Image (cartoon, grey):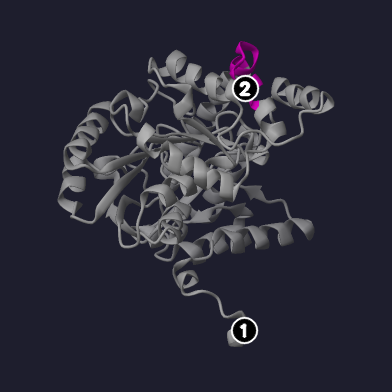
């Protein structure tokens, strides 16, 4: 490689996704005629609900295909604020709602507006890998907090307090989390929020799997800290992955900085997707989404005991999202090699833990129950035949 196209130094810390190798092999196997059960993809298998699609069609036929304001359509920002009041009993001023190109766009805006070079951002390990990389691209230092079943795969207030330094700028919590599906207890979240407020550290809450919770609904971080930075998405609960639309709620002190960044980076969120998203909050749409949540819970309740019976170590029941983070130490100590074995010998595709950090990464797999109950039962039987 010549210096002419030498990648920037920051790229050295950006790791590739190991699951892409699994996906590539799975697609090649399927193209060759093999039947593959896909449990590696973190995307709902349901198509976008029809009322949302119809709203997008109507909007485009009406000529709503031009730029909106950088922070998003006023009507959509008001609808999102109304959603917080209806679902969580939290009053959010619509001006604080920023509509973004996906939750990834929201996290980039927030971190670039908040983090200076050398600032530390604390987050759980295992956790969604892009969050670490977003911090790095902002010049910050992601600091891993190792978590496990003993704390329900979530950082505790005591753990966070012990990790705080003068350089700590923010703590990023994900509830429900990817890859574990773990939800932070309301009391623990309140304790964490109070601690960070006292220490002058920002709380960033990744809540993109809110709505996909299978017990009492989770508490938004805004219920514990009115100035928490909350990131959410239309991708998971609302089933709009390909529409690339998310949002963030930011404190007034950060709003102008986020707006300037949005103007420069994105111009505006996708207009057709914004008009579609207005229909996401309609009662007829929410009824469909609740039926799908029930289907996800049913799938979890099939996959979880199936994996446990085979011998996977899953001491903590996942309470949300659509993932099970399964210990495979009984069978292997190299999660990547083991995932390739499951694909080659059982036709089941899963994500190796190596994609989610370093702590316990080599002894865990993530299974996504984003396929039908029948296919999940088929996968469990194949794994049982191979491993049990």
**Secondary element at image label 2:** helix
Would you say residue 104 is visible in this rendering? no
Mark 1 touches mark 2? (CB < 8 Å) = no
Mark 1 lies on residue = 4
**Secondary element at image label 1:** helix
* Residue 238, disc: none
Residue 150, quarter of the rendered image: top left
Question: In front: 325, or 176?
Answer: 176
Q: Residue at (54%, 55%) from the top-left corner? A: 386
The answer for how far apart the CA atoms under marks 1 and 2 are is: 48 Å
Residue 11, relative to residue 44: is it above or below? below
Q: Residue at (63%, 48%) from the top-left corner? A: 38
Residue 381, relative to residue 356: is it above or below? above
Whether 162 is among the magenta residues is no
Q: How crowded is mark 1: few (under 14 residues within 10 Å), some or many (20 or more)?
A: few
Disc number lying in front (1 or 2): 1
Q: Main secondary structure of the magenta part?
A: helix
- Residues in magenta? 277-287
Whether 282 is among the magenta residues is yes
Question: In front: 308, or 351?
Answer: 351
Residue furthest right as drawn: 61
Q: How crowded is mark 2: few (under 14 residues within 10 Å), some or many (20 or more)?
A: many
Residue 187 in percent (x, y) is at: 23, 27
Question: In front: 279, or 358?
Answer: 279
Mark 2 lies on residue = 280
Q: Residue at (50%, 40%) from the top-left corner? A: 259
């Amino acid at each position: 490689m010549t210096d002419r196209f030498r990648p920037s130094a920051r790229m050295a810390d950006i790791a590739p996704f190991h699951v892409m190798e699994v996906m590539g092999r799975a697609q090649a196997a399927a193209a060759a005629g093999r039947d593959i059960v896909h449990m590696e993809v973190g995307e709902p298998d349901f198509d976008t609900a029809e009322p949302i699609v119809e709203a997008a069609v109507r909007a485009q036929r009406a000529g709503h295909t031009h730029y909106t304001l950088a922070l998003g359509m006023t009507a959509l920002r008001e609808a999102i604020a109304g959603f917080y009041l209806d679902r969580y009993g939290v009053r959010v001023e619509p001006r604080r709602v920023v509509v973004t190109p996906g939750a990834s766009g929201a996290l980039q805006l927030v971190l670039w507006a908040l983090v200076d070079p050398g600032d530390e951002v604390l987050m759980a390990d295992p956790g969604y890998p892009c969050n670490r990389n977003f911090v790095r691209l902002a010049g910050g230092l992601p600091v891993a907090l190792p978590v496990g079943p003993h704390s329900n795969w979530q950082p505790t207030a005591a753990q966070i307090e012990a990790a705080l330094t003068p350089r700590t700028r923010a703590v990023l919590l994900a509830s429900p989390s990817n890859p574990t599906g773990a939800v932070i207890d309301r009391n623990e979240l309140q304790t964490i929020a109070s601690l960070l407020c006292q220490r002058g550290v920002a709380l960033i809450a990744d809540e993109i799997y809110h709505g996909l919770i299978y017990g009492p609904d989770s508490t938004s971080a805004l219920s514990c800290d009115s100035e928490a930075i909350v990131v959410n998405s239309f991708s998971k609960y609302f089933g709009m992955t390909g529409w690339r639309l998310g949002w963030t709620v930011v404190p007034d002190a950060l709003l102008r900085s986020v707006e300037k960044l949005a103007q420069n980076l994105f111009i505006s969120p996708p207009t057709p997707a914004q008009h579609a998203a207005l229909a996401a909050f309609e009662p007829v749409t929410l009824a469909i989404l609740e039926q799908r949540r029930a289907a996800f819970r049913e799938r979890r309740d099939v996959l979880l005991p199936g994996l446990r019976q085979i011998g996977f170590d899953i001491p903590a029941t996942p309470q949300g999202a659509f993932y099970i983070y399964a210990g495979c130490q009984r069978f292997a100590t190299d999660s990547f090699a083991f995932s390739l074995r499951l694909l080659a010998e059982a036709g089941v595709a899963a994500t190796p833990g190596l994609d989610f950090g370093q702590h316990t990464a080599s002894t865990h797999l993530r299974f996504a129950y984003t396929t039908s109950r029948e296919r999940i039962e088929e996968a469990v039987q194949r794994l049982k035949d191979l491993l049990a």
